[in-house]
Amino acid sequence: MSAPERSRAPITGPAGASGVTEQPRPARRVPLIVGAVLAVALGGATVAVSGWRMAVLYVIGLAFGAVLFHARFGFTSAWRQLVAVGQGRALRAHTLMLAVACILFAPLLAAGVGVGVDPEGYVSPLGVSVVVGAFLFGLGMQIGGSCASGTLYNVGGGQTAIVFTLVGFIVGSVLGAWNFTFWTSTMPSGPAISLAQMPWGYGGALAVSLAVLGLVAASTFVITRRRQPPEVGRPPAAKGLARIVRGSWPLWVGALALAGLNALTLVFKGSPWGITSAFALWGSKIAQGAGVDVASWPYWSAPEKAETLAGPVLAHATSVMDLGIILGALVAAAAGGSFVLHRKVPPRVVLGAIVGGILMGYGARIAYGCNIGAYFGGIASFSLHGWLWALVAIAGTYAGLKARPLFGLAVPKSTDSSC
């Protein structure tokens, strides 16, 4: 189990991170009120600072937080389950999410559909930086107990251990920004390649992507048949409106919702959903306030990035959406009665959270993204960079599973009743 899974009984859907479902608990009124007030206040501040378009992105962020929490849509646990015991259910949910996102992205990118913006996908160069960064991210996920999106929604859900992961994430992101050019300019790097740039265009790119995703999904059945993982327990779930508002959602619902929200992000933001660039901004602003000449770093010298560093946080779309995810998860967790702050976290778990966060933050910067920007957004944008990132991150997962016991974290076994 990851740090949050160890700290409390999970409240997940039939195919959630742990595969266990509980009946909804009574709402936690104080956290719910606090979360709702903060959500409204931040929304008002966003409108005042950046206008209606940024407010729309903030609302999309709130929705992301609620969906991630209710579906317990995990990236860290999905890869851990597949690698450790051959359980492929969660990874198949990834393929569904990616397939639907590709279907939605193809016409939007082909026709340039955007509300006041010209949408562009995440298509990044192939190179050593991607290989090293994705491996570090995969390793860090398993040590830190969460991925980029998981870090935000678990912090909103009250998982104290993951706060340390977020701190490490920010530190690692700043370090990655500091020597970004070493990896992108000094180390070997190839071109940015999109499948849509081939003669077949977006139609062919979509067909190829769906075919590969179908093969990935099929391979999980083969792995499961060979390794025979344990059955996942499924106690009865709540019914009707109670399940929608306060209970758990099936992974396939989360997959469809995340794909749709990512498409909305593309339309209103002009680029797919991302997370970790905000961590680099937050950390760099803190370092700048401490007297570090962050503005002189090549990473922040480009005009657009320099403007971002000099401007308010609420003018940065990714930051606004990240804050929305945290608050959306907070409200969802409080409404579902599962918001619990844990006062005691084992020292080794704290160390693992920080180290894992640093590895993920650094890896995400030099690899042009995390499990959201590179993996989800890259593959949905038909970038070969996204596929390379995924393959190497799985290799990092293998290494992370070997390192987990060093930080007091368990590794799923074939005899476990859930994984």
Image (spheres, rainbow, N blue to C red):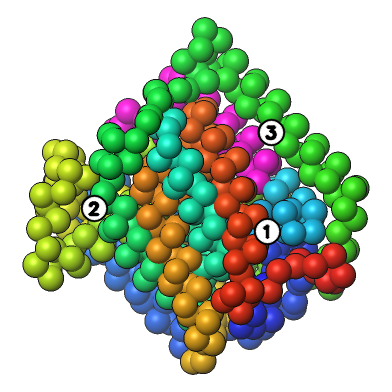
Given this view, does label 2 or label 1 mark the residue nearer the observer? Answer: 2
Residue 208 in picture, x, y percent from top left = 64, 21
Q: Secondary structure at mark 3?
A: helix
Disc tally is 3
What amino acid is labelled 1 in the image? Arg
Q: Which residue is mark 1?
A: 80
Q: Is residue 85 magenta?
A: no
Q: Secondary structure at mark 2?
A: helix
Q: Residue at x 68, y 74 (%)?
A: 410
Q: Is residue 183 left or right of residue 353?
A: left
Of the image marks 2 and 3, the number of the one nearer the N terminus = 2
Query: Which residue does the image show at 44% across and 69% down from the upper left?
Result: 355
On residue 178, which mark appears? Answer: 2
| Residue drawn at x 56%, y 48% as measured from the top left | 393
Magenta span of residues: 94-123
Q: At 85% across and 65% down in the image, what residue appears?
A: 414
Check the image and report above or below for 410 versus 251. Answer: below
Gap between marks 2 and 3, in whole Å? 36 Å
Give the residue type at disc 2. Trp
Q: Which mark identifies residue 39?
A: none
Q: Helix or strand or loop: what does disc 1 sit on? A: helix
Query: Dividing the image into 4 quarters, which one contains the N terminus?
Result: bottom right
Q: Which residue is mark 3?
A: 213
